[in-house]
Image: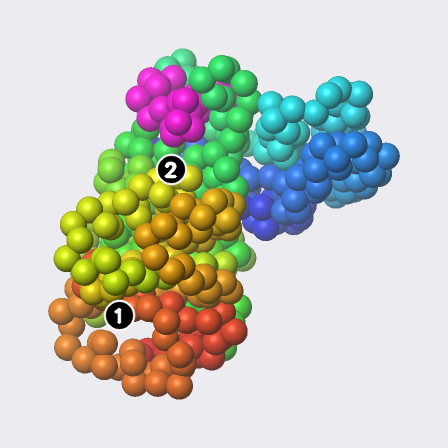
Amino acid sequence: MKVMKFGGTSVGKPERMRQVAQLITSGNEPTIVVLSALSGTTNALVNISDSIANGDRAAAKRKIDELEAHYRNFVLDLVQSASAREQANAIVTEHFEFLTIILKISFSEALNKDILAQGELMSTKLFSIYLEENGVDHLHIPALEFMSIDHNEEPQIGSIKVKLSQLLQQNSNKKLFVTQGYICRNVKGEVDNLKRGGSDYTASLVAAAINATVCEIWTDIDGMHNNDPRIVDKTVAVEQLSFDEAAELAYFGAKILHPTCIWPAQMYNVPVKLLNTMQPEAKGTTIEQNANSVGVKAVAAKDGIIAIKIKSSRMLLAYGFLRKIFEVFEKYRTSIDMITTSEVAVSVTIDTDLHLDEIIKELEPFGSVEVDKEQTIISIVGNEIAQTPDVLKNVFNAISTIPVRMVSYGGSHHNISLLIPAANKKEALQLINTGVFGL
């Protein structure tokens, strides 16, 4: 059995949803299909929720009406028979009545999660009706019946495995299943989610739970590219990556794949394929256990980085100094991306300013604190690049005109990371594309 996940752009228009139906019925292998919300829906629901939270219920009602009109037009184009349209419109009515009713309810975080779940619930139900209209035998299985997280908001893979296996065994006569990405239940049994981009996570968790032959992630680009195609003109798809290489790229900014998607597949050794809905014949990218080659494969950029430098003459030979520094970040649950040290200073990077003021205040007793905002981490990724001849030379030759704030080299066999001003990001990526990849 395999898993096929389709993102918002892959189901964002009726013609694309019809194309998805062709893709999932083109093979003979039993399949679980994971769908995101229609493109733009989650953002619209976030805006609706924010308006309610801010007490502007009139604005929320306008946004609800706009979104409902979009779905009514979507149904009109998606299905053709009178009965199918009646079913589909009944689903739209049900969900938008819910959104209208909540305008009269006090806002809470639990209510926010309910609002955000509506997109996936509608996309899968509408897709199921389209499949029924076209005689495609399948079963709609609600993710809320098997997908769950614990009190730390981590997926309960054991529970997911048991519940999903039971659902599949109870319907062993079916070969095609449709479910929602992103949404789940928390330890209280309330509707919750796997955070933004979580449909990739759902697909990987489902694939791990059923020991799938493959987990296919279908998007609007033909695999993971060697560089950011939105910024750099000449990029090529990378045919093969190891799980470790893909995890580095996803964490450091490759937008095609959610960072959390890697570990369940890696843990259960399920290959992941990144494929293009609009170009299904393209090879895409295969992610598996082994790297199969050495050298640089791709580069990614992570924006919104803040560099913090703590300088202290007392640091020299002072054991416990770094531990005390890290404890400050641990206290505020703020992760560190990069770290460099010298005899008198330590520099770290973080990707959020949520507790920045508090962190700086607690670091000041250790020495002078300097903060540089609007930084970018450029991450060059490939198997054993720290041991590959000339990689470091080629990288620094390529970006000789770029001011480099920090370098992380040797901490991973797969990664060289550079911290540069965000203003130099585009130029740096283009220079690396020419100097390292020869494109």
Q: Secondary structure at mark 1?
A: strand
Q: In the rendered structure, which amino acid carries the disc numbered 2?
A: Lys
Q: In the rendered structure, which amino acid carries the disc numbered 1?
A: Val
Q: Secondary structure at mark 2?
A: helix
- Residue 364 x/y as whole percent: 39, 52
Q: For marks 1 and 2, give the one nearer the viewer.
A: 2
Q: Name which residue lies at 38% across and 60% down.
A: 368
Q: Is residue 76 visible?
A: no
Q: Are marks 1 and 2 in contact (CB under 8 Å)?
A: no
Residue closest to the eye, 365 or 276 = 365
Q: Name which residue lies at 72% across and 32% down.
A: 53
Q: Earlier in the sequence, mark 1 or mark 2?
A: 1
Q: Residues within 10 Å of mark 1 (few under 14, many from 20)?
A: many
Vertical arrangement, residue 397 with respect to residue 245, above or below? below
- Stretch in magenta: 143-164
Q: Which mark is residue 272?
A: none
Q: Quadrant of residue 254?
A: bottom left
Q: Residues within 10 Å of mark 2 (few under 14, many from 20)?
A: few
Q: Name which residue lies at 75% across and 32% down.
A: 52
Task: Name the residue tied to disc 2.
Answer: 331
Task: Name the residue tied to disc 1.
Answer: 296
Vertical arrangement, residue 297 with respect to residue 26, above or below? below
Q: Is residue 150 magenta?
A: yes
- Residue 333 x/y as whole percent: 40, 39
Position of residue 284 in the picture relative to residue 75 (left or right): left
Q: Is residue 20 magenta?
A: no
- Residue 299 x/y as whole percent: 36, 67
Position of residue 157 in the picture relative to residue 186 (left or right): left
Which quarter of the rendered picture does the N terminus lie within?
Answer: top left
Q: Is residue 389 visible?
A: yes
